[in-house]
Amino acid sequence: MSEPEASELRLLETALYLDDVALEARFYQDLFGFRLLSGSTEPDAVFAALEIPGKAVLLFFKKGANAQPVDTGRGMIPPHGGAGSLHLAFTILTDSYQSWKTKLVARNIKVESEVHWPRGGRSLYFRDPEGNLVELATPGLWPFADSPLGSSANGQ
């Protein structure tokens, strides 16, 4: 049997731990159009899973709800959690940068910062309702060419 390769890895899930799962899930659904895969967006929700189309899953957990192992009937999910203001970034097309900025402003979502990266990429930063830092980034942020965030300018 051969050794597994890092090149096969892709980020499948990431999670936010929240006071109000429903508010956050609806925010991401309304802004990005992410589809609810599992859980709930009702006011008493303790869990929601949203699909980042064809790419990954954004999980929302009520703070403290995963302090104990969860028996799925097919195995145990170990305890997990997080606290504080977290950061996540989504890729956008270079040509849609201004459209995203306009959409945020039209929804009264304050653009906290804009960064022009040395490789040609640009980032918009804003906060979700619970204060997590959200970034929208164009290609040219990181130096790997086979990625949507890789450099397309100057072959870097």
Image (cartoon, rainbow, N blue to C red):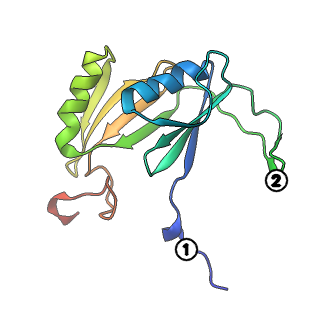
Write the residue at 26% across / 35% down: 115
**Relative to the observer, which residue lies in front, 144 or 33?**
33
Write the residue at 31% across / 13% down: 108
Measured in 3D between alpha carbons, the distance from the residue under mark 1 to the one under mark 2, in whole angstroms, is: 27 Å
Extreme residue in the bottom direction: 1
Q: Residue 24 location, x and y as percent? A: 52, 23
Residue type of the residue flagged with mark 2: Arg
- Mark 1 or mark 2, whichever is nearer to me: 2
Label drawn at residue 74: 2
Q: The N terminus is located in which quarter?
A: bottom right
Looking at the image, residue 60 sits to the left or right of residue 122; the answer is right
Looking at the image, residue 28 sits to the left or right of residue 117; the answer is right
Q: Residue 55 location, x and y as percent? A: 45, 51
Looking at the image, residue 136 sits to the left or right of residue 2; the answer is left
The picture quadrant where one finds residue 114 is top left
Residue neighbourhood size for the residue with mark 2, other residues' Cα within 10 Å, grouped as few (<14), some (14–19), many (≥20): few
Give the structural element (helix, strand or loop) at label 2: loop
How many numbered marks are there?
A: 2
Q: Residue 57 location, x and y as percent? A: 53, 44
**Relative to the observer, which residue lies in front, 5 or 46?**
46
Q: Examine the rendered structure and indicate whether residue 144 appears above or below residue 97.
A: below
Residue neighbourhood size for the residue with mark 1, other residues' Cα within 10 Å, grouped as few (<14), some (14–19), many (≥20): few
Q: Kindly check if marks 1 and 2 are in contact, taking CB atoms under 8 A apart as contact.
A: no
**Relative to the observer, which residue lies in front, 77 or 32?**
32
Say which label, 1 or 2, has the lower sequence index.
Answer: 1
Label 1 belongs to which residue?
A: 5
Q: The C terminus is located in which quarter?
A: bottom left
The picture quadrant where one finds residue 150 is bottom left
Q: Examine the rendered structure and indicate whether residue 43 appears above or below residue 116.
A: above
